[in-house]
Amino acid sequence: MTTSSVSPVTTELAGSETGITFIIHAGAGSRGKHSTPERIAQVELDLQRALDAGYQLLESGAPAHEAVVAAIHVMEDAPEFNAGRGAALTSDGIAQMDACLMTGDGEVGAVTGVSTVKNPIDAARAVKEQTKHVLFADPTDAEIADWGVATESNEYFITEQRRQSLAEAQSGGDEWEKHGTIGAVARDAEGNIAAGTSTGGITNQMHGRVGDSPLPGCGTFANQSTVAVSCTGIGEAFIKVVAAHQVSDRVRFSGENVEDAATATLDEVAAHHGDGGMIVLPAVGRGVVAYNSEMMNFGYRSAQGGKVQG
C-alpha cells in the first residue's frame, strides 16, 4: 500500500481571539484525478452552506455543540464529502460510517460501523446524551430507533462516483484515497467549545476497519481548558500518535500555541507515513487550520470575517 507524499505543514490562523468562532473542514489530501472546476465550486458552495448553518446558530446564542451538529448535517447530506450520503465504500461495496461528538466538559459520544443512520453525527450525539456509554460499534436497529435517529437503506449513501472509486482501487493497486472526512469546532458566546467529526473511512477498507474519527483523542477531542480538535487524513497514522489529544497536551503541558502544537503533531503523523490535516480552536484565542497534504477543504467565520477554501 502506498501513501501520497507528505508536504511541509501549512497553517492558517482562523477566527477571533474571543467571542464566537466557527471552523469546519471537509477533508485533506490530494485533489485526485477526478477533480474538476465544477466539483471544486460545488465543494465550496456546500462548505459555505455548512459554515452558515453553524455560525447562525452561534449568533443566536446556541451552544457550541449545536453549531457543530448543524454544520455536519449539511456536509453529511452533500455527496461531495466522505460522510453520510457519498461515503467511501468498503471492500464489500457498502457504506460503513463513523462519527464522534465531544464537548469541552469531557462528555463524548461516538459510533462506528453504522450503515443505515442518515446522519451519523446524530447517532454520536444520542450516545453522548441518551446512554451511559461512549462508543457503540454497529448499534442495532432497535437501539437506533430508541434514540429517535433517522435511518435510510444503505443504498441511499452509495453514489456512482464512489462505486467508480472502489472499482479503481480494487483494480489499480489499492492506493490510499481520501474523499473528504468532515468536521467542525466551535466556540459559543459563553466561551464553551465543542468538536465533531464524521466519515465514511477509506475507499476499499476492510469490513470492520475503524479509523481515527470516532475515537476520542485520536480524530476528535475537546477540553475546555485547552482546545477542540477535529482531524482528517490517513486515520491509522492519527491513531498511532493520538493526534487530537496530543495537540491538547502540547497546549496544556508545554505551553505551545495552537499553531505550533498542530504543526508538531502533524510532523508526528508524517513520521508514521500519514498526511492530512486538523482544525483546532482554543477556549480563548484564535484557532488554526493546519495540514501536511496537497490541499485541505475548510472554512471559518467570526466577527472579524471568514473564508472558504475548497
Image (spheres, rainbow, N blue to C red):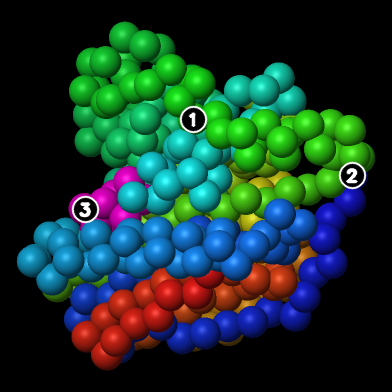
Between the C-alphas of marks 2 and 3, the distance is: 39 Å
The residue under the point 49% across, 30% down is: 157
Residue labelled with disc 3: 66
Q: Position of residue 220 (x, y in %)?
A: 47, 53
Q: Position of residue 19 (x, y in %)?
A: 20, 81
The residue under the point 45% across, 25% down is: 156
Label 1 environment density (alpha carbons within 10 Å; few <14, some 14–19, many ≥20):
many
Residue 59, quarter of picture = bottom left
Q: Quadrant of the N terminus?
A: top right
Residue 140 as seen in the image, left or right of residue 154: left
Q: Is residue 70 magenta?
A: yes
* Residue reaching furthest to the left: 60
The residue under the point 62% across, 50% down is: 179
Magenta segment range? 65-73
Q: Is residue 57 magenta?
A: no
The kind of residue on which mark 1 rests is Phe
* Number of the front mark, 1 or 3: 1
- Res. 181 visible in picture: yes
Sequence-first disc among 1 and 2: 2
Q: Mark on residue 157? A: 1
Circles 1, 2 touching at the beta carbon (< 8 Å)? no
Sequence-first disc among 2 and 3: 2
Residue 289 in the image: above or below residue 303: above
Between the C-alphas of marks 1 and 2, the distance is: 26 Å
The kind of residue on which mark 2 rests is Met
Q: Position of residue 87 (x, y in %)?
A: 55, 38
The kind of residue on which mark 3 rests is Glu
Residue labelled with disc 2: 1
